[in-house]
Structures are given as C-alpha cells and as structure tokens.
Amino acid sequence: MENNREFADKVYEMVKQIPLGKVTTYGAIAEKSGLRLSARTVGWLMNLSIGDPTIPAHRVVNRNGDLTGKMHFPTADYMRNKLEEEGVEFIGERVNMQKHLWLID
DNA sequence: CTATTGACCTTCT
DNA sequence: GAGAAGGCCAATA
C-alpha cells in the first residue's frame, strides 16, 4: 500500500508547516515521522522537493545548525540569504538554533 | 537485480 | 573529549 509513501508525506507536511523565520532539523522530522535513524532519507526527499515551491527545504538544517544542503540549492548563498531574509539569525555559518529551532508539536 | 552514494544521527571505542 | 563505525531509506549507475 502506501506505507513507504507515508514517511515522505509526513516529512513534506511538517516541512510545509514550518513557521516563517524558523528552522527544523532532519532528526526531528525523521523522529516525528517514525524513522529516527533514517534522517538521511529526509534529506533525499528534500532533494526531490527542490522544484516544489510548496516545500521550503531551505528551512531544514542539520543538528549542528549548519546548512548542509546549501550546495544542492541553485546557489550556495540561496539558503543563507533566504533564511536571513525571513529574519533568521546566523552565527557565522550556522543558524541560531537556540532562537529559531522549531520543534514539531 | 546488486552495488554505491547521499541534505544525517546515534552509539561505541 | 575526539574519532570511527553502524544504521536506516531511497535513488542512480
């Protein structure tokens, strides 16, 4: 059935529900989706999400707050620029998780 | 169909 | 505290 699809669906749903000026982590999404040890798959789905304006993949960062997927974006500064534009504070090359880390309810 | 890689995270040594 | 390995899911060659 659509069991495997459920994971991707949940990931997309949560990413789409990320409030403006907030960022989340792959682990949080993976864990909330039921795949705690499969954070990598989240990234893969995000990669496929590129091209979908409904999925703000630029708001998804890793546990370190580093923009790991910036290289997969149109431009390396796209992610950083977009987040800054939304009001996200940056600490060097990392996002201020302590302030903008959004956890799923 | 098998093997390798990839936007990660956790745990052991 | 730092480093290395394992684990999961999916896509590509």
Image (tube, coloured by chain):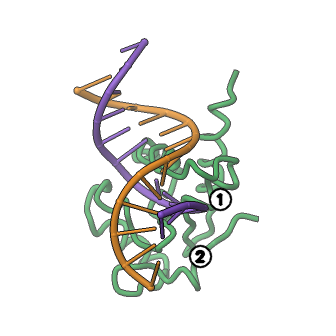
Chain colours: A green, B purple, C orange
Mark 2 in CB contact with mark 1 (< 8 angstroms): no
Instruction: Tell me: residue A58, above or below residue A46.
Output: below
Element under disc 2:
loop
A39 and A8: which is toward the camera: A39
In the rendered image, the quadrant that contains the C terminus of chain A is bottom right
- Among the 4 quarters of the image, the one containing residue A6: top right
Within 10 angstroms of label 1, few (less than 14), some, or many (20 or more) residues? few
In the figure, is residue A8 to the left or right of A82?
Answer: right
Q: Residue at x 34, y 80 (%)?
A: A93
Image mark for residue A44: none
- Numbered disc in front, either 2 or 1: 2
**What is the chain letter for disc 1?**
A
Decide: few, some or many residues near mark 2? Use Cα within 10 Å; few <14, some 14-19, many ≥20. many
How far across and how far down the image is residue A8, in percent?
59, 40
Q: In this view, does C3 lie to the left or right of A36?
A: left
Compared to residue B5, the image places residue A16 above or below, namely: below
Q: Name the residue under label 1.
A: A17
Quadrant occupied by the N terminus of chain A: top right
How far is mark 2 from mark 1, CA to CA? Answer: 13 Å
Instruction: Name the residue carrying label 2.
Output: A101
- Considering the numbered disc 1 on the image, is that residue within a helix, a strand or a loop? loop
Seen in the picture, residue A98 relative to A71 is either above or below; the reply is below
Task: Return the x and y of residue A59 as percentages of the image width and height.
Answer: 50, 65
Of the pair A84 and A3, the residue shown nearer to us? A3
Q: Report the residue at 37% width, 59% height from top.
A: A69
Q: In percent of the image, x 28 and y 69: which residue is there?
A: A77
